[in-house]
Image (cartoon, rainbow, N blue to C red):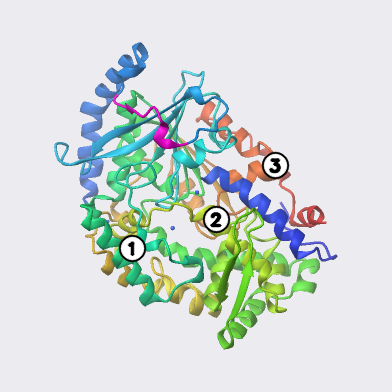
């Protein structure tokens, strides 16, 4: 597909932002997604032996019992569904409850935690679909059950759907959120000392409550999936994950491939590689692709010029004189007033790139408007991103996952060298905590031992996988999907060159039902390549310009 630019007649930035945000909000519903050293010998031998000797038998017995009597499963039913106002079309078909799992799966008789689960009944007897959200640290149960259309986005061929709040997240107990973050304007990019002080207060808050922060790691999270599967009596399941959820799905499939029928990986992240090393290069690469797409079409290049030069000009002005901007999210909500520095501006650019098309149709205009002195349009996008993507994030779970894992092995010098644009290097990477210049200082504050080394994990390559990537994805770059496609024995790579993070959500927004039809075809027969012809019908950026009027 050819990537074209905005038509020559410049649309109103107000209209442009309004429609872009509507697309953003619709796609975000699908992701309701956005970035270790315990022995992998244990993961690939002990876990497999346990799966062979116990999980298959136990899960099979549980399945037989569940078929005879649904109450025979090890799900502690919550009749009030965690206090969530269930808005799905058939609330009577929703069963909520918790599965008690070991805090440390290597010590099954030790302390326990509760994993929140919502099962949405379908009519099919085929393997259920387990949905795993991203982050790490993003909740799933309440956001999906609270949106009438959200369950439909995940539903596949009338199979049972199982929504899981991962350990430390959402309605699971304990939930690792912190009051210390309540009054922090993260979008304003606090200075490093302030960020670390807040993080230290968060750590103290959780440890004072008796939380063992070191126990919230990738391996425990993956083992929880199979504990839930056994508790619900499911011999095999389909794992559907977006962003970090795909990392978790691949890890869980590696621990017990016999329990996983197929994988649906949306914006895939590879648990056998250190995805944090791709974080800064991924942002840089996506910006370069947007700039190249604009430069290739005079309808974008002539009015808006070179994207890198425009960003540098805005950064230089804000470095000399920061500007206070008030903007309201077009989707509704309170106005946000903050002082825009170079760092805040780069954060707004990053936020804009969560749009279904990675901001390719709008970012050159927004940066141009900022260069001309009007920061409100991009500030409006920034405020919207915070509402859609940062709500209810479990900061404690996020920091435990990354600091016991990829952050422990992150090479900040290599990350810095991978960033070529000075604006990104000096005013984004230099102020990032995890995956940036202050990665090590952040994990020193969080103070958990390394528990997972991605370089030592060998993926199970015999579970069929659907890999869906977006060409403008700035969080999980498309190269990850290409690498996984080459490594996994039975995999199908769906590339959407003009979409970004969460391309399945983008496909459903841009071409109604496209992403859902691809997933349904794959899950129905994971050994046959699905029909992906609808991807060719994604509107070009020129067509988006026509929409914007």
The one nearer the camera, 209 or 37, is 209
Q: Please state the horizontal and vertical placement of residue 209, each as a whole percent of the image.
A: 23, 53
Q: Secondary structure at mark 3?
A: loop
Q: Please state the horizontal and vertical placement of residue 107, each as a whole percent of the image.
A: 15, 41
Per the rendered image, the range of residues in magenta is 74-84
The one nearer the camera, 482 or 306, is 306
**Farthest-out residue, right:** 9
Q: CA distance from mark 3 to mark 1?
A: 37 Å
- Give above or below for 478 relative to 71: below
Assess whether mark 2 and mark 3 are in contact (beta carbons under 8 angstroms). Answer: no
Is residue 156 found left or right of 276 in the rendered image?
right
Which residue has dot 2 on it?
387
- Give above or below for 269 relative to 223: below
Q: Residue at x 40, y 36 (%)?
A: 82
Front: mark 2 or 1 = 2
* 2 or 1: tag closer to the N-terminus: 2
- Give above or below for 158 relative to 426: above
* 3 or 1: tag closer to the N-terminus: 1
Which residue has dot 3 on it?
511
For the question of whether residue 513 can be seen, the reply is yes
* Mark carried by residue 514: none
* Mark carried by residue 407: 1
Is 80 a magenta residue?
A: yes
Decide: few, some or many residues near mark 3? Use Cα within 10 Å; few <14, some 14-19, many ≥20.
some
Q: Secondary structure at mark 2?
A: helix
Is residue 492 found left or right of 453 in the rendered image?
right
């Amino acid at each position: 597909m050819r990537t074209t630019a905005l038509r020559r007649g410049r649309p109103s930035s107000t209209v442009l932002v309004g429609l872009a945000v509507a697309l953003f909000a619709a796609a975000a519903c699908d992701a309701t997604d956005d970035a270790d050293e315990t022995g992998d010998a244990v993961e690939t031998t002990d876990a497999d032996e346990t799966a062979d000797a116990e999980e298959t038998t136990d899960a099979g017995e549980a399945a037989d019992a569940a078929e005879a009597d649904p109450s025979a499963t090890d799900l502690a039913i919550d009749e009030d569904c965690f206090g969530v106002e269930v808005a799905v079309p058939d609330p009577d078909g929703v069963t909520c409850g918790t599965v008690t799992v070991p805090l440390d799966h290597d010590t099954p008789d030790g302390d326990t935690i509760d994993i929140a689960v919502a099962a949405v009944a379908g009519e099919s007897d085929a393997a259920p679909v387990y949905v795993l959200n991203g982050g790490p640290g993003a909740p799933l149960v309440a956001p999906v059950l609270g949106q009438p259309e959200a369950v439909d986005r995940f539903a596949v061929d009338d199979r049972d759907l199982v929504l899981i709040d991962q350990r430390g997240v959402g309605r699971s107990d304990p939930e690792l959120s912190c009051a210390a973050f309540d009054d922090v304007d993260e979008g304003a990019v606090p200075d490093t000392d302030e960020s670390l002080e807040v993080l230290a207060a968060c750590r103290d808050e959780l440890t004072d409550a008796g939380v063992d922060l070191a126990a919230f790691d990738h391996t425990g999270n993956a083992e929880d999936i199979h504990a839930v599967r056994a508790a619900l009596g499911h011999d095999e399941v389909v794992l559907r994950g977006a962003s970090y959820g795909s990392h978790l799905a691949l890890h869980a499939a590696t621990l017990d491939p016999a329990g996983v029928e197929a994988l649906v990986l949306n914006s895939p992240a590879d648990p056998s590689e250190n995805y944090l090393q791709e974080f800064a290069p991924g942002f840089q690469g996506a910006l370069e692709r947007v700039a190249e797409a604009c430069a290739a079409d005079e309808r974008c290049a002539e009015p808006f010029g070179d994207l890198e030069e425009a960003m540098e000009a805005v950064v230089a002005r804000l470095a000399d004189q920061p500007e206070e901007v008030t903007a309201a999210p077009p989707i509704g909500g309170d106005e946000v007033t903050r002082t825009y520095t170079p760092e805040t501006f780069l954060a707004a650019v990053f936020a804009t790139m969560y749009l279904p098309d990675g901001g390719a149709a709008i970012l050159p205009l927004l940066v141009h408007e900022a260069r001309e002195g009007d920061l409100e349009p991009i500030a409006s996008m920034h405020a919207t991103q915070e509402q859609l993507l940062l709500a209810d994030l479990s900061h404690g779970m996020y920091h435990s996952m990354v600091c016991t894992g990829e952050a422990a092995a992150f090479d900040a010098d290599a990350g810095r060298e991978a960033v070529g644009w000075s604006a990104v290097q000096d005013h984004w990477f230099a102020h990032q905590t995890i995956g940036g210049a202050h990665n090590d200082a952040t994990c020193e504050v969080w103070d958990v031992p390394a528990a997972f080394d991605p370089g030592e994990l060998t993926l199970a390559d015999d579970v069929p996988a659907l890999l869906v990537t977006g060409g403008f994805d700035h969080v999980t770059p498309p190269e990850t999907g290409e690498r996984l496609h080459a490594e996994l024995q039975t995999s199908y790579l769906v590339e959407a060159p003009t979409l970004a993070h969460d391309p399945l959500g983008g496909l459903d927004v841009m071409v109604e039902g496209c992403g859902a039809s691809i997933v349904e075809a794959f899950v129905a027969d994971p050994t046959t390549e699905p029909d992906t012809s609808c991807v060719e019908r994604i509107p070009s950026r020129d067509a988006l310009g026509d929409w914007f009027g």
